[in-house]
Image: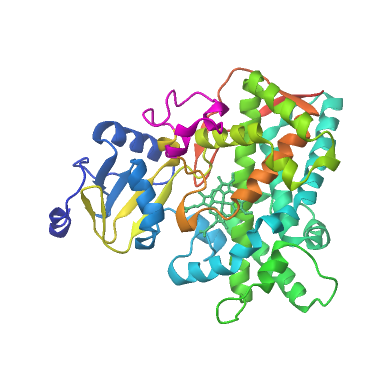
Amino acid sequence: MTEAQLAYRRPPGPDQTVTLGIDQETLATLEALQRDFGDMVSMTRPNGRLAYFVNDADEVRRILVRRHSRYHKGPGFERVKMLLGNGLIVSDGEVWRRSRTMIQPAFSRQNVHRLLTVMVECCDRRAVHWADLVARGENVNITEETSDFALELILISIFGNDYQDRILTQGENPFAFLSRDSTRDLSVVLKVRKLRELLMSIIEGRRSDQGEEQFDFLSMYLAAVDKKGQSFSNAELLDELMTLIVAGFETSANTLNWVWYLIAKHPDVEERLLQEARQVLPGVFAVNADSINSMQYTQQTLEEALRLYPPVWLFTRRAHDEDQLDDYDVPPGTDIYLSPFILHRTERYWPDPNTFDPERFARTDKASRDRPYFPFSLGPRRCLGEYFSFLEMKVHLGLLLPRFRLRLLDDKEPGLELGINLRSASDIYLQPEER
Ligand code: HEM
């Protein structure tokens, strides 16, 4: 620790240096720090940098909402940067503010509603495939299915007809490796490079295309202008499209993966979901914004799944300005670690935290509103796709659950893989039956 660091009022913490990443060991380290030192912990990392682990609901809110401008995105985003360049998720300061202002209107409820038909189409394709698996007596790899569903949906939502005409014509879906390959080896670098070349040619094609107008995120991004009336350059657009693809499918896919597992494990919840789906969606014709938004129990189930398995399980920030948290000083350069996974399972906020119970999110349960809950983050950097993802997941469950029962094959709890996203450690297989 340097002299300057000693002069600050720091929360308690271990004397020895602490190594933190965004991985399995980090979860164990953070849980041990919480147990040993409480809700605010300070530590020195091996590189000498000061880090705080903040597990207090008010202080988390302060960092993400009221004092957000004093913090930038933190360490651990190297792989994300490799994929996303300087897109919305990783950018900071003025670059982020300009992009966010340009992009936010694309995510209006009205625009998202126009994508409902694409959501239905993507469910139809899964239904055909699952019926085929039933006929052949095969199990569903639900991890792969939810991933394919969410990837296809986001790609059609972004590229419209170009998905069919320019992307699927490449042979195997060139984006598929994003969900299956979490390594950082050279082959990924090469695949990302090829992907960016493909995206650039689609962007250039659209710019020169005077043909019929399409409704998709790419058109909206192309039309977006900043305060000076300037639109995105091709390089900026490329980063933002990659960001949208990566942010927009893995998170929803992982949530649906856990939800199907939880439903299979809890027949009482399944029964209530089924009743709601049958009542609200007697057929595909009934899918519209009002009907989907009225699926209250499905919403609660998704919220509860996101409490237990928040896909973004660890947020990192780096203070670029001085701050105070509780009675402690945050000198510039301090790394901050916040974990929805840990806070969502902290007993004093969430009684019996490891039990799956969608009733926690019933409208009548007022206490739940005050509990720390931030699967989509909070404040100005809150997820832009939150509404899109709830709609997508409710359409998915509302159409597929009344057609298929997916049963557990055994009692084994799936393990966790903790990377940038929280996934199941291995693919989850379920046995499908047509109802
Ligand atoms: C269950 C689904 C999802 C979850 C749990 C989720 C979670 C999050 C979280 C936690 C962040 C903030 C990360 C941080 O501050 O470090 C974020 C940002 C973002 N998400 Fe999502 N997300 C989901 C789905 C989506 C979808 C479907 C889209 C797009 C269609 C999307 C687009 C974005 C974008 C563009 C940002 C960056 C916002 C900014 O920094 O201004 N997300 N998401």
Q: Residue at x 38, y 48 (%)?
A: 61
**Front position in the image: 129 or 259:** 259
Q: Residue 174 lies in magenta, yes or no?
A: no
Between 299 and 77, the residue placed more toward the observer is 299
Residue 292 left/right relative to 14: right
Q: Quadrant of the C terminus?
A: top right
Q: Residue at x 21, y 45 (%)?
A: 11
- What scheme was used to colour the molecule? rainbow
Whether 16 is drawn above or below 300: the answer is below
**x and y, in percent, of residue 164 in the image:** 82, 58
Does residue 19 appear anywhere in the picture?
Answer: no
In the figure, 297 relative to 220: above or below?
above
Q: Which residues are magenta?
A: 345-372
Task: Give how far across and how far down residue 386 sits, in percent.
Answer: 59, 49
Query: Where does the image place residue 72, in percent across and percent down from the top left?
Result: 39, 61
Q: Is residue 311 left or right of residue 60?
A: right
| Left or right of residue 169: residue 217 | left
In percent of the image, x 62 and y 21: which residue is there?
265
Say which quarter of the image contains residue 84. bottom right
The kind of secondary structure the magenta stretch mainly shows is loop
The front one of 243 and 133 is 243
- Examine the structure image and report whether residue 364 is included in the region drawn in magenta: yes
Q: How many marks?
A: 0
Q: Residue at x 32, y 63 (%)?
A: 320
Is residue 283 in view? yes
Q: Nearer the viewer, residue 113 or 384?
A: 113
**Vertical arrangement, residue 20 with respect to residue 219, above or below:** above
